[in-house]
Amino acid sequence: MPCLRGGLQLALADARGGAFGTVEKMKFAKGTNGEKYDKTTVTYNHNVTITKILLAAYEYIVNGKSALEWVMERQAVITHKESGIVNDANDWAVETMKIVQGPTHAPGV
């Protein structure tokens, strides 16, 4: 079920449990033709994939890396090995932005 916004395409798949919009770790799609990654496609979670990202989007740099890669690094669930403290980007979204943990599936999917 693609949702288009400008040149970007957001592909919504059937939910396989859990909240539809939660993230564990954003990552690039696997590359083709010998490339390690496909930077035109980012997987947000098993339900949401962003495609058709222009490579020019990586030209804006924040702290030594592209802004998109900087966000991808931080939008994750990470457990600090020594302390066991969990840093969960989903908790921040719920608490700070008042995002409600929505339905476990996309409407109409």
Image (cartoon, rainbow, N blue to C red):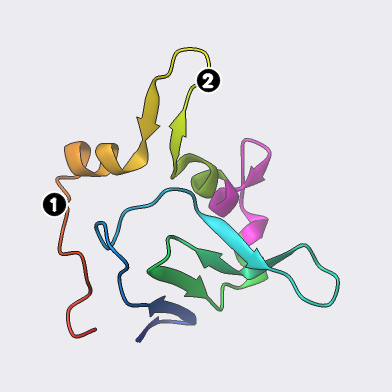
Q: Position of residue 14 (x, y in %)?
A: 32, 77
Please state if 48 lies on the left or on the right of 100 as rendered. right
Identity of the amino acid at label 1? Val
* Residue highlighted by disc 1: 100
Q: Kindly indicate the quadrant of the structure image that contains residue 2.
A: bottom left
Q: Is residue 108 above or below residue 25?
A: below
Q: Is residue 96 magenta?
A: no
- Residue at image location 20% in from the left, 64% down from the top: 104
- Residue at image location 55% in from the left, 54% down from the top: 68
Say which element carries label 1. Answer: loop
Q: In front: 16, or 101?
A: 16
Please state if 90 lies on the left or on the right of 51 as rendered. left
Which disc is residue 5 wearing? none
Q: Position of residue 25 (x, y in %)?
A: 48, 49
Q: Residue furthest top?
A: 83
Please state if 88 lies on the left or on the right of 57 as rendered. left
* Residue highlighted by disc 2: 81
Mark 1 vs mark 2: give the one in front.
2
Q: Kindly indicate the quadrant of the structure image that contains residue 10.
A: bottom left
Please state if 38 lies on the left or on the right of 87 as rendered. right
Boundaries of the magenta span: 58-69
Mark 2: few, some, or many residues within 10 Å (few <14, many ≥20)?
few
Tag 2 or tag 1, which sits nearer the N-term? 2
